[in-house]
Amino acid sequence: MNETLLILLLLFTKHFIVDFPLQRDYQLKHKGTYGHTGGILHSGLHGIGTYFCLVWFAPLSAVYLAFVDFVLHYHIDWAKMKLNKKLGYGPAQEQFWWLLGLDQYLHALTYIGLVYLITP
């Protein structure tokens, strides 16, 4: 497996672990309140995970890139939660699932961008 695919595999595995098994109700409930510790905790776990995914491949920029992931992840999740709340979308509406898909797509684009920055 080449380095680019390995880094993407690590990032997407991290994403699954932090977004699903590690995400608790406290994080989920508060991601739509800007500055709340629930959303910060969730995005912070993503940032920490990203650091560990990248440090072997880009030791000098792993902290910076992990911070970028933290900031982007926070704002992507916050915007999704705000839109769902403002528009009244829940799991029963198909638009809820569109927003969830868009959220996941934007996270994937973030990882592709991070990999682009550290691979030749």
Image (cartoon, rainbow, N blue to C red):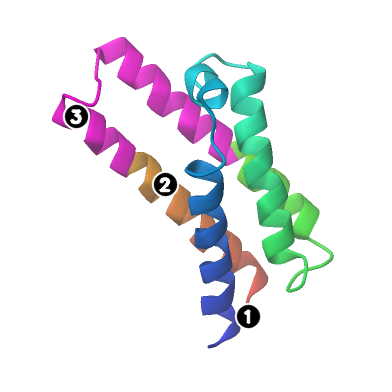
Which residue position holds label 1?
120
Magenta residues, start to end: 72-101
Q: Are marks 2 and 1 in contact (CB under 8 Å)?
A: no
Give the residue type at disc 3: Gln
Q: Are marks 1 and 3 in contact (CB under 8 Å)?
A: no
Taken as a whole, is the magenta stretch helix, strand or loop?
Answer: helix
Location of residue 69 in the rendering, given as x and y in whole percent from the top left corner:
62, 46
The quadrant the C terminus occupies is bottom right
Q: Residue at the spot x=25%, y=21% of the render?
A: 90
- Membership of 24 in magenta stretch: no
**Image position of 70 with respect to 62: above or below:** above
Which residue position holds label 2?
106
Q: Residue at the spot x=24%, y=35% of the render?
A: 97
Dot 3 lies on which element?
helix
Which residue position holds label 3?
95
Location of residue 75 in the rendering, given as x and y in whole percent from the top left corner:
53, 31
Q: Residues within 10 Å of mark 2 (few under 14, many from 20)?
A: some
**Image position of 10 with respect to 70: above or below:** below
- Membership of 96 in magenta stretch: yes
Q: Residue at the spot x=44%, y=55% of the render?
A: 108
Q: Nearer the viewer, residue 118 or 42?
A: 42
